[in-house]
Image (cartoon, grey):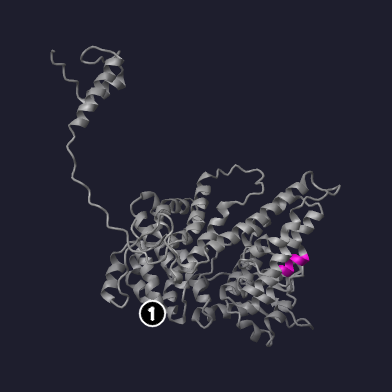
Amino acid sequence: MPHSTAPPPWEELVTTALLGTDRRPTEQGGGPAELLDAAALLTVRRRAGLRPAPAAALPEPAPFDPRPPLPPAARRRLAQLLADRSASGGSGGRRGTAPDLTELIPQWLATANRCGFRAPATLLPQLLDAARSRTDLRPQALAFAGPRGLWLAGLNPEWTFALRGSSGGSTLPDITDSDAVARLWEEGLFAERIALLGAVRAHDPAVAPALLATTWATERAEDRLMFLDSLRTGLSPGDEPFLERSLADRSRNVRSVAAELLSALPRSAFAGRMAARAMSCVSPDITCDEASIAVEAPHECDAAMERDGVVAAAPSGRGERSWWLGQLVEATPLSTWPARFGGRSAREIVALPVADGWAEELHAAWCRAAVRQRDPEWARALLGAPSVPPSHGPGTASLAERSKLLTVLPAVERSTWVAGFIAAHGLSEAFQLLGVCPTPWAEPLGRSVVDALDIARDAGSYPWSFSGVMGLAERCLNPAAANRLDVLTTPQDEPEDASPGANGYWSEAFQRLVSTLRLRAAMESELAVGPGLRPAPADGDGGNNY
């Protein structure tokens, strides 16, 4: 058999394919079929002639995770939750009576972490995929994944998000070893440096600002902002010198955060300067027979004010003077005002009339100050009684601001206040307030929500407007309430003025609520084995090797 002519080099074939065989036929003069034959032959020859490459080094074994494995039932439940997340397509429309499993993943992870279990090795890829697509899952998912999850994330570029919020799986040095700490601080990745800064601050809060100062001048603005923001945890008077220097930072965002942190230190020099400015603007009104508040907003924003973080340019729609006044008042220690107004309490000061229409601006600034300084006395005064309509309350009518004020109160008091608000005003304005209440909801709050939903149904209200609150109830009601809610699942006769099909929706929604609560109860019972009891290895996770 005659030896076949060797095919042309690969580059020649590519050129012929691009130009076309009509303009540039193959060396044998053939058309497209001959070109493809030549390409196939050359491909096989190139692959057959490839020499084996040196074997890549095997990765280091996954680190040991000392936590006990999940009980078998809990492991199967996690697999079901993750599989449902992958299969759900978000098709919209009516949800039916089945629980939404994707909304239960955060609670399941929180409970598993609280019980101290480790993630099954075979489910780590699905767990990391879920955390990649849902940022709200990441803190709990990564805590549950543990050291083996970080190890696995280092092998897949799609999971690098897991390394950004940690030290990248690396071991931090001994915090007492100053040389090792300095070396990692100067040479480490950003995630490693953030983790190191947190560890140093937990060990000795005074060392963290000193460590920051060693490289502060050479850091990027966005990194300086993140480092400075980390000082919120454990903030103390010892941070004042570093924060004062940061007021002169070249980044406006860094200056703003430094000013905010200094205003949370009521004895700082910064707080004293802002208090002096605010008291020159807000004072007892001596022109009135009855006690009241007079306000004279600043007429200019001078260089010293700007250096202390006051932003000179007002947002669109805001007057400059009111904008400057609000910044001064919110940065002033709340302890300034009782002495300014004759020893009155926060509640008495807030109740004083404010001259010339400045009440809304002044009260809004006090709200921001109460949140920033975590002052429950002022938060109570500005919230007022829950039965009072927001538009007539002592503080601000903004539900967003009221939600922030509620976070300052103890958990039980917070839930009691929101329960009273719902009882007085219904659910139409309560969604944001419910979002800051601890879960599962305490009994008075849970009962007030269910009663308000029942009242809305009986009144023939448009049902879809309550879908957000119903979704919250599915996740936040105490599962023990399921049995007494059965009566609400039965369809009722529709009032004449009700939305068509409304009662069918309400019945369906209450059935879903009950079934979700019972599923949550089952999930909790599956995880009820404490780690100290060392439960038997779950199916498929008998060891600690990946």
- Image coordinates of residue 358 in percent, x first then y, are 70, 70
Residue 296 seen in the figure:
no
Image-quadrant location for residue 373 = bottom right
Q: From the viewer's perspective, is 176 left or right of 128? A: left
Image-quadrant location for residue 534 = bottom left
- Crowding near the residue tagged with mark 1, few <14, some 14–19, many ≥20 C-alpha atoms within 10 Å: few
- Magenta residue check for 421: yes
Helix, strand, or loop for circle 1?
Answer: loop
Q: From the viewer's perspective, is 517 left or right of 30? A: right
Amino acid carrying mark 1 in the image: Asp
- Magenta residue check for 476: no
- Image coordinates of residue 438 in percent, x first then y, are 61, 68
Residue 290 seen in the figure:
yes
Foreground residue among 443 and 155: 443
- Image coordinates of residue 102 in percent, x first then y, are 55, 52
Numbered range of the magenta stretch? 418-424
Q: Which residue is mark 1?
A: 204
Which residue is found at the position 25% from the left and 14% from the top? 25
Q: Residue furthest front?
A: 536
Image quarter where the N terminus lies is top left
